[in-house]
Image: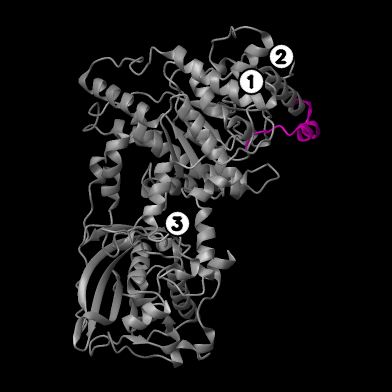
């Protein structure tokens, strides 16, 4: 990523000498007992960012340490003296009311005492945070706790104490390690690190008249080395990268000036939310980040090496394997919160514990179907983890042959013919009401077994980059069980109409409420880009930031793209037929990473009732969620189908296009490419 790695420092100010030759004692931190050092090469002057911006960047990086190190997943917050940054336990608890999940007893909040704060002359200690670094590869690197002390120093003008002359913000990072041997590879081999930002305010009248930044700041890095430790080239590069990242994030941060919010309480565009930190829109809003990443790490170690080693497709294995493992991790944690089910290994441990035997009865998992399952990796891992289900695709893949026989039997070659299309072609209502996994053949002279997507009750539908099947996913779930529509996870990819032909949907119309909120978040929506009070006056940074933000999921501009419009269309169709719909940015190695979830809250409520009934010893009513108004759901689905098929000449014309494209893929790869029919991910 060129922009991410671009050097933003003024290299003309650097000496060009090795860092060891330019070190001097730190005037702020050095004491007789601690020989803190710094260097002119570790300072960047004339920065236009106000101190609040640097505070926001600092708080953002407290949790998102992965921005500074590719060896780390994240940093878990274990303690925050202000109580604003949430611990993993608090995140699970906060997700519990809406999801039905409750933190397990063994997941009780862990407490780690912070290291004592240093007495820094002239500075006031304002906040103490303890965090834990979580490595991407726990087999290679170990976790490390670190205490972060935040200091502040404000100096007023002579004779005008209400007007600040300068403000300095200081952060001291101290690892819980007593020697360099105890320090993991990903952490600099030093005893402590500090970042200081010193900001000098200009005369207020001059600033307002010239519309320039309110002052100028200097960012500097200070560190406490181990005794007799040489300054390596790697350490010098690390320091330079830390300064560069701090500047890069400051450039992309804009604090809110929303009335009624004090500094640091509003939204920002550097990733945090003032002094409380924060998450990107629609990311980690369904399942806490640490749960998904911990499960992903386990799955990666367990299945990653063998899948990559035995890969038989011509495509790059790592991309497909790790993407599917990421999605599997999300599904496992999603199903844990919805159904109260856990992987087979955890169930075995629970059953093997005499103290827990029968103490926490859980209803069985209702099963899943992976439509357009492609290489079958997702189905394979889910089955091996103890979740019942199956998958189908229009073409058998080479990868299926590397899986155990019990997995191969659940991967089926077959085509989905939407029920409205089948009824239109055959005339009248479809006679088949059996589940799709009965391998029904609709006898449409396609040359391959086909079905109408009628699945067993409560089946969870997985639609992972299913292309033509994406917009059909909610319709499929509703038609399969009109009285109780099936829950689903759809990850859109390529945009298609209901007929299967390629189609670009128009962007959704702006929501007046959302538009009003956007205007409220922008203190001056009519201002020129160059008037951004938090960056320089040239305007170029503001325009670049604006363009980047408009392309982010969750932003209005996202839905103007083909992918965004497809995501919005899938969500709106699901809502139109009665689904409760949510969206979340999945942590997967793909730009097509928006997940659309339907029916989660309704299913969670139902399974919560079932678990309670099991606990009390009463029978769980399998139809407790059923809505007697199934005919109304079917009518809504058909209204959508009739309307959306008008662009292709009606339902029958759309059905003919769908079947013809299906025949093309059965005819062979050449013919399949000619008609453009999808074969799953």
Residue corresponding to mark 1: 417
Which residue is label 2 attached to? 444
**Disc ID at residue 136:** 3
Please tell me how crowded label 2 is: few (under 14), some (14-19), or many (20+) other residues with Cα within 10 Å: some
Quadrant holding the C terminus: top right
Query: How far apart are labels 1 and 3 at the CA level?
Result: 42 Å
Mark 1 residue element: loop
Residue 102 falls in image quadrant: top left
**Of 491 and 614, which appears nearest the observer?**
491
> Which percent across, then down, holds residue 513?
39, 43
192 versus 662 height, above or below: below
Q: CB of mark 1 within 8 Å of CB of mark 3? A: no
Asked if residue 179 can be seen in this view, the reply is yes
Q: Is residue 292 magenta?
A: no
Q: Do the residues labelled 3 and 2 touch (CB within 8 Å)?
A: no
Between 642 and 552, which is closer to the camera in this rendering?
642
């Amino acid at each position: 990523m060129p922009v991410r790695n671009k050097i933003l420092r003024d290299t003309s100010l650097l000496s060009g000498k090795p860092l060891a030759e330019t070190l001097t004692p730190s005037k702020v931190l050095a004491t007789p007992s601690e020989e803190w050092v710094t260097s002119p090469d570790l300072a960047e002057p004339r920065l236009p960012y106000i101190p609040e911006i640097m505070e926001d960047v600092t708080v953002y990086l407290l949790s998102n340490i992965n921005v500074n190190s590719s060896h780390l997943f994240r940093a878990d917050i274990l303690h925050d003296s202000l109580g604003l940054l949430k611990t993993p336990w608090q995140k699970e608890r906060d997700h519990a009311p809406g999801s039905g999940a409750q933190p397990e007893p063994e997941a009780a909040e862990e407490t780690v005492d912070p290291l004592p704060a240093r007495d820094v002359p002239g500075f006031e200690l304002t906040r103490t945070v303890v965090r834990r670094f979580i490595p991407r590869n726990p087999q290679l690197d170990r976790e490390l706790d670190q205490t972060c002390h935040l200091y502040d120093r404000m100096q007023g003008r002579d004779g005008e104490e209400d007007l600040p002359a300068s403000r300095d913000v200081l952060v001291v990072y101290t690892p819980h390690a007593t020697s360099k041997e105890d320090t993991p590879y990903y952490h600099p081999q030093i005893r402590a690190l500090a970042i200081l930002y010193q900001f000098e305010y200009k005369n207020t009248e001059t600033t307002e008249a010239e519309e320039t930044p309110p002052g100028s700041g200097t960012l500097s890095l200070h560190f406490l080395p181990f005794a007799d430790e040489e300054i390596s080239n790697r350490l010098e590069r690390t320091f330079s990268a830390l300064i560069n990242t701090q500047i890069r994030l400051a450039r992309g941060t804009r604090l809110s000036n929303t009335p009624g919010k004090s500094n640091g309480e509003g939204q920002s565009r550097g990733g945090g939310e003032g002094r409380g930190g924060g998450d990107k829109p629609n990311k980690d809003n369904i399942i806490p980040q640490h749960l998904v990443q911990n499960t992903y790490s386990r799955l990666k170690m367990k299945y990653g090496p063998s899948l990559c080693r035995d890969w038989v497709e011509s495509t790059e294995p790592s991309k497909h394997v790790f993407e599917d493992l990421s999605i599997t991790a999300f599904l496992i944690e999603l199903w844990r919160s919805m159904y109260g089910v856990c992987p087979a290994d955890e169930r075995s441990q629970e059953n093997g514990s005499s103290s827990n035997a029968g103490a926490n009865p859980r209803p069985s998992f209702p099963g899943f179907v992976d439509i357009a399952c492609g290489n079958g990796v997702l189905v394979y891992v889910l089955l091996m983890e103890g979740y019942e289900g199956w998958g189908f695709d229009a073409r058998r893949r080479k990868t299926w042959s590397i899986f155990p026989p019990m997995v191969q039997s659940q991967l089926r070659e077959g085509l989905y013919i939407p029920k409205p299309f089948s009824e239109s072609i055959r005339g009248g209502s479809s006679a088949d009401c059996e589940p799709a996994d009965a391998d029904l053949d609709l006898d449409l002279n396609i040359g391959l077994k086909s079905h109408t997507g009628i699945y067993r009750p409560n089946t969870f539908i997985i639609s992972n980059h299913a292309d033509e099947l994406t917009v059909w996913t909610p319709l499929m779930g509703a038609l399969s069980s009109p009285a109780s529509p099936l829950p689903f996870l759809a990850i859109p990819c390529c945009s298609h109409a209901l007929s299967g032909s390629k189609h670009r949907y128009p962007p959704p119309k702006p929501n007046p409420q959302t538009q009003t909120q956007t205007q409220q978040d922008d203190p001056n929506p009519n201002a020129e880009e160059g008037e951004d009070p938090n960056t320089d006056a040239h305007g170029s940074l503001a325009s670049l930031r604006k363009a980047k933000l408009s392309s982010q999921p969750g932003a209005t501009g996202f839905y103007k793209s083909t992918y965004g419009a497809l995501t919005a269309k899938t969500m709106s169709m699901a809502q139109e037929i009665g689904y409760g719909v949510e969206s979340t940015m999945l942590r997967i190695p793909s730009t097509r990473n928006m997940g659309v979830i339907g029916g989660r809250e309704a299913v969670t409520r139902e399974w919560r009732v079932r678990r309670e009934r099991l606990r009390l010893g009463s029978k769980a009513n399998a139809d407790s969620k059923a809505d007697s108004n199934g005919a109304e759901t079917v009518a809504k689905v058909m209204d959508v189908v009739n309307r959306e098929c008008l662009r292709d000449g009606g339902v029958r014309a759309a059905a003919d296009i769908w079947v013809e494209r299906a025949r093309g893929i059965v005819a062979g790869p050449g013919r399949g490419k000619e008609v453009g029919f999808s074969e799953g991910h």
